[in-house]
Image (tube, rainbow, N blue to C red):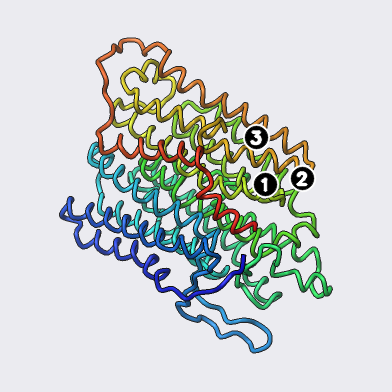
Amino acid sequence: MEITTVNDVKLLIALLVPLIGTLGVMFMGKNENVREGVSSAASVILLLLVASMVPAVLEGKVLVYHMFTVFNGIEGVTDPLTIKLRADGMSMIFALVASSLWTIAVYYSMGYMRAHQEHAQTRFNACFALAIFGAIGVAFADNLFTMYLFYEVVSVCTYPLVAHAQDKDGYNGAQKYIVYLTTTAKLFLLPALILIYVITGTLDFPTNISDGLFTDGLSSGNIQNWTVIMLYIFCLFGFAKNGVMPFHHWLPGAMVAPTPVSALLHAVAVVKVGVFCTTRTMLYVFGVDTMHALNLGIPTAYFVGFTVIAASVLALSKNNLKERLAYSTISQLSYIILGVALLTPAGIDGGLIHIVNHAFSKITLFFCAGAIMIAHHKKDISQMGGLGKSMPITFACFFIASLSMIGAPPVAGFVTKWNLLVGSIQAHQMGILLILIASTMLNVGYFAPITYKAFFGKRPEGETYQGIQEAPLSMLIPIMIACTISVLIGIFPNFMMQFVKAVTG
């Protein structure tokens, strides 16, 4: 498909919508209904703007918008350093996820925050919108420099959300969160960006995933292999939001935040920003050919494969529902990197589509955890015996979303697992195949008992059935919508796969 570049101001407008929404929330903070109306309106407008770009991208166009130039570069040596936006196939994968889930999360948050009578709701909504601003900036970044800036925006804007409770646990979790993410970015990512710019003369993403920034320098002998390998490792660890061990401890610690924040962290913005930046860098900075030439792919797949298994084993030991879901997220994120690292068509397809599949399924699971806490004040799995009879819709949705995490048809996760299994066979990596099979069994091990206990387990001593007691409809409806979408994108995966195919060709 021939690729044409088109200047489109809609990219800038889409970036500004959540920023304007933030200002609206702050100015209307005293009026609860107006404040939430601003949040919901901004989320819908953003979704419509992103959706309006879909036809052009599917036609093979790359939409771009140059915001401003930071550094003019050295003539004949380096390209200008710019803040520039770009919408291509890979951008649309993340932008569609972030914008659509923000819309659902806004309505869920309204119900949760009111039912739980949370304090500082204006600050919460403002920071939530700012986090989406950062996520959209990452999605539409046209170069590493722009992506890095918005990556840091996400870190800063989500810190108050993690510390929302303003108690000892909240501050400790937030401190760990910000220290991990900013330290890794400054120690690994920023030096890597500077060296890449000095060595290659550019930070702009190419249009083809085969053409890495280092390709010409490696073929001419101007760049040493060890230098590229070092920069690759720095980027892998620098984007610590990807949850790869050993830089994963911030993620379970952030579970002290309110459930809508956990959903934001795990499905909409933070961790998805991490894996999107990681895979974008793997494919568009280093490129498939360079990764093949330097044998970077398969070692990466095995390295993150350890995270897949270890995090799943740790999830088995967690009694707190949100903690179990947190370790599940750590494991599931590595599926995305593992698939891309296989460097096979099916592997890359499976990795990239899991950005979408995991997002809708995991946000459903966290929404369910919040509904359980609001309706019955339960956080621990051991206390959820028989609760499925009181919350049949919530636990039915939880069961369906957990099937997606396991990889069972017809839910979205099956599309991921199938492509990853095929990709491991294409790469002739039986070890990766065994990792995927073992992780699937572990997925069953830590998800199935929750649903079984809820529907068939005994109630805790002293509790009796009081009839159906679901969370408020303002929370229940978003749960059902997210759950339904996770099924639909499993049955009809072709729409999102179009954008994946636009990346892989």
Q: Nearer the viewer, mark 3 or mark 2?
A: 2
**Image-based side of 354 in relation to 48, left or right:** right
Q: Amino acid at mark 2?
A: Ala
Mark-to-mark CA distance, 3 and 1: 18 Å
Q: Position of residue 242 (x, y in %)?
A: 57, 50
The image quadrant where one finds the C terminus is: bottom right
Label drawn at residue 347:
1
User: Of label 3 and label 1, which has the lower sequence position?
Assistant: 3
Q: Residues within 10 Å of mark 1 (few under 14, many from 20)?
A: many
The residue lying furthest to the right in this view is 221
Mark 2: secondary structure: loop
In percent of the image, x 81 and y 69: which residue is there?
A: 224
Q: Position of residue 274 (x, y in %)?
A: 54, 53
**Image-based side of 481 in relation to 35, left or right:** right
Label drawn at residue 496:
none
In percent of the image, x 36 and y 13: which residue is there?
A: 459
Label drawn at residue 427:
2
Give the residue pinned by disc 3. 309
Q: Residues within 10 Å of mark 3 (few under 14, many from 20)?
A: many
Front residue of 432 and 309:
432
User: Of label 2 and label 1, which has the lower sequence position?
Assistant: 1
Front residue of 223 and 158:
223
Quarter of image, res 429: top right
